[in-house]
Image (spheres, rainbow, N blue to C red):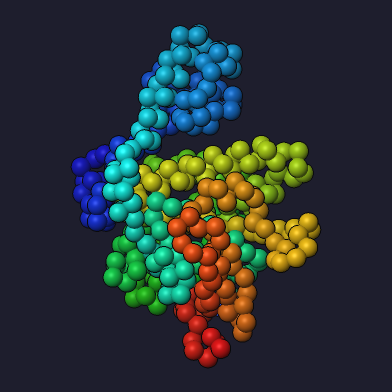
Amino acid sequence: MEEDEIEQNEENNEKEVSSDFEYKDIKDLPGVGSAIASKIRNAGYQDIIALATANPMTLVEACDIGEPTARKIVAEAREASKMNFMSGLEFEDKRKSVQRISTGSEALNILLGGGVETQSITECYGEYGSGKSQIAFQLAVDVQLPLEKGGLEGHAIWIDTEGTFRPARIEQLAAVKGLDPKQALQNIKIGRAYSSDHQVLLVDKIPELVNADPKIRLIVVDSMMALFRAEYVGRGTLADRQQKVNVVLHNLQRLADRFNIAVYITNQVMARPDVMFGDPTAAVGGHIIGHVATYRIYLRKGKKGSRVGKLVDSPSLPEGEASFEITSNGIADLDEEKKK
Ligand code: GTP
Ligand code: MG
């Protein structure tokens, strides 16, 4: 890490995140260039962790390399992935550096244990118009606020897969919070993904962006599954799709860990004809996202134009619900009248 980068981080975080949690790409391993790296990926080993568990003989065939080289590459991958272990004490220290971004609604913040957390993936799923993107707009503005106002004085990255990013909405929300609207927009890097492969590439680019701008504290992916869902039709390719989604999610989680960043992803729901009772909807992407996301919020439309967020399967927080509304000023708590 560069020296000024460390300074920045110290400024942003109460405590520096353990920096030995090195993010490495396969191509950065000694003896692996981009040509071999891409062959390794084609052989199904998408990241260092996967490669660390590979049988060297598989690589000999798939990458057209000698056995000693293959053994060396796997050994290097094992060495590099050792960094994923830390003592319980170190883990606790790292957890202490977790920070939270306000969603704009106190009720929703409380439901999430204080706001959207860094070092975690928060997934928000719900039907069309339920407010998933609106929460993302609010977070992208609120992350820029000072700590005492629910922000991290940070910047954001926004991966837009549906073409629904609206600069005007950012400017409007920024003005409400007393930020300079143009500057607020300047502080958000937008990547428009046109295909699922493109989405994977954009996520791969993030470490570079964060190195260039250590103030980045929020990554939005709106929406996570839209392109995958459109491209992988029919159940035959489902395993393929899930494997790719899995890689993206794990990369996002690693970024969240390494740089103390909050990741917020949105997801649509699909009708579940097999569910006869209760709410017949389920998040697209099924269990894979469920297992990776630390916080999952199910959003639905409530009474009198309100929205209801339900916390689903949280590891540490009780399940519960929070009502809020979407106003021209952004996400807000319901007024007393509407609570009735
Ligand atoms: P999809 O992306 O279509 O799946 O939906 P989504 O969950 O992302 O919905 P989104 O966050 O875009 O919410 C759209 C809703 O927010 C609209 O239907 C409006 O009810 C509300 N909304 C958006 N902008 C404003 C605004 O300026 N004022 C008010 N009062 N409501 C707004
Ligand atoms: Mg949306």
Q: Tell me if 215 is positioned left or right of 42 in this view.
A: left
Picture residue at 64% right of the left edge, 50% below the top: 286
170 and 70: which one is in front? Answer: 70
Picture residue at 58% right of the left edge, 28% below the top: 44
Residue projecting furthest to the bottom: 337
Picture residue at 64% right of the left edge, 56% below the top: 283
> What is the quadrant of residue 140 in the picture?
bottom left
Q: Tell me if 157 is positioned left or right of 215 in this view.
A: right
Q: Tell me if 273 is positioned left or right of 191 in this view.
A: right
Residue 189 visible (yes or no): no
Count of labels in the image: 0
Indicate the quadrant containing the C terminus: top left, top right, bottom left or bottom right.
bottom right
Picture residue at 59% right of the left edge, 24% below the top: 43
> What is the quadrant of residue 64 in the picture?
top right
In the image, residue 321 lies at what x, y percent?
54, 71
Q: Tell me if 272 is positioned left or right of 222 in this view.
A: right
Above or below residue 139? Residue 331 is below
In the image, residue 47 lies at what x, y percent?
49, 32
271 and 93: which one is in front? Answer: 93
Indicate the quadrant containing the N terminus: top left, top right, bottom left or bottom right.
top left
In the image, residue 174 lies at what x, y percent?
40, 72
> What is the quadrant of residue 180 in the picture?
bottom left
In the image, residue 299 lies at what x, y percent?
59, 67
Residue 41 visible (yes or no): yes
